[in-house]
Image (cartoon, coloured by chain):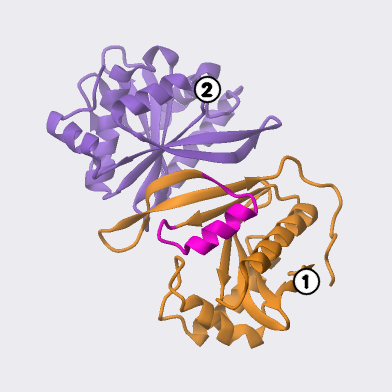
Amino acid sequence: MKFVANVDFNGGQLRPLDQSDVDTIVKLYQKQTLAGQSTTASTEHAERMITLSVQMAATQRGLMWAIEVDGQMLGMLSLYDWQPTSLKTLMRLDVLPAITQQQQVDALSTGIDFLAKKYHLRNFSFHCLPTDDEAMISTIQQVGFIQQACLRDFRRTSQTEFSDILVFNKILESAPETQGEGESA
Amino acid sequence: MNWNLNTEHYYVRFAHEEDIQNIYALLGANDVVKNHPKNPMVVEAQAMDEARRMVMQFEAKEAAFWLVEEKATGKVIARISLQQFNWVNASAQLRIDVFSDFKTQSALSEMMYAVATLAYEDLSLHRLEWFLLLEDKCFIDIAKAFGFNHDGQLMSFLEFEGSWIDYQVFSLLKTDDVWQQAIKAQGLPQS
């Protein structure tokens, strides 16, 4: 059974992760510009992530899409802490340098539209470290995310050190009633 | 480790079997729960269930709940809790249910200082956060008076009776100057 839909956007598509994505996932996680990325990212971790992406989607705890442009995977758009009863989710965007900002904006906007129509989600958020990639923050702001809070020392970075977390939100006024629009599979 | 705390005017203690009626009286009062937001309890069975959940959450290391008993009268006037323990990031959420007569800076400073001291010193937490509604001006003023920082807001955090609820987030860090001063003064500001 397929739990993650293919969704077309202008110039590319969001699609489920598969085994051929392992090398790209390792590259994405070795970038070290976002929380959780590290030089220690390995093939084994990437394979586990692909398995997890199916488990998360099957139980509506999260979802992971590969962002594909011209047949190449250039990033990932992910959902964590998906709370169907509260119609909200936490998002994450990991991209390689080859993808343009406009393509990221299109992918993110299309993903949000799909999630709103298919699952009635209305509250989308990003948690960013203040040191996160500025381009990523600029991208989510272009999609309409607004910084609502700076949670002081919210994330522990070592035994004795903590980092603030910037909270960005995009709230849709009402969940659209139509379902599945834009879904190609 | 002693979880039962003692302040000048209050016993800040864990609940026992005889507290069902105290929990029911407290959480059945609309003025106590309206700003959480929550509906007041309407039958005592809800208090029994709540007491059970308090124990289960404590045993699972997810939360700790204290009832605040006024020494002079023996009356339970509040429940204070640390919830959503995050042991990785060393944080917890503070929550206070208190009768409106005792919703004062002076009363809260005693119970809050006792619980915050346990949180920072015994549990090695680093961040206490307090989610408040914008219209709960009394608690917001008290949070500011205690030195809590307004971190911002969490939008549409939950739905209650057909409305989406935004929470204002306040935080107090173990390393904050105001907390270090409170330790030296052995108390939070009372007025």
- Vertical placement of residue B177 versus A106, above or below: above
Q: Residue at x 38, y 20 (%)?
A: B76
Residue on which the image places disc 1: A6
In whole angstroms, how far apart are the C-alphas of marks 2 and 1?
44 Å
Percent from the top left, x then y, of residue B170?
40, 36
Q: Which chain is purple?
A: B
The type of residue carrying mark 1 is: Asn
Q: Residue at x 53, y 58 (%)?
A: A137
Q: Residue drawn 79% across and 53% down?
A: A117
Residue with the mark numbered 2: B135
Q: Quadrant of residue B105?
A: top left
Q: How dense is the environment of label 2, judged by Cα within 10 Å: few (below 14), some, or many (20 and up)? A: few
Question: Mark 2 belongs to which subunit?
Answer: B
A177 vs B187, left or right, is right
Q: Could you tell me if residue B98 is visible in this image?
A: no
Measured as percent of width and height from the top left, residue A103 is found at: 67, 68
Dot 2 amino acid type: Glu
Q: Are marks 2 and 1 in contact (CB under 8 Å)?
A: no
* Residue A115 location (% of width, % of height): 73, 57
Taking the spot 46% from the left edge, 20% from the top edge, the residue there is: B137
Q: Nearer the viewer, residue A17 or B80?
A: A17
Q: According to the rendering, which colour does chain A have? A: orange
Q: Which residues are magenta?
A: A129-147
Residue B169, by quadrant, is: top left
Q: Nearer the viewer, residue A137 or B164?
A: A137
Count residues near mark 1 (Cα–Cα under 10 Å), then give few for <14, some for 14-19, many for 20+. Answer: some
Is residue A77 shown left or right of residue B69?
A: right
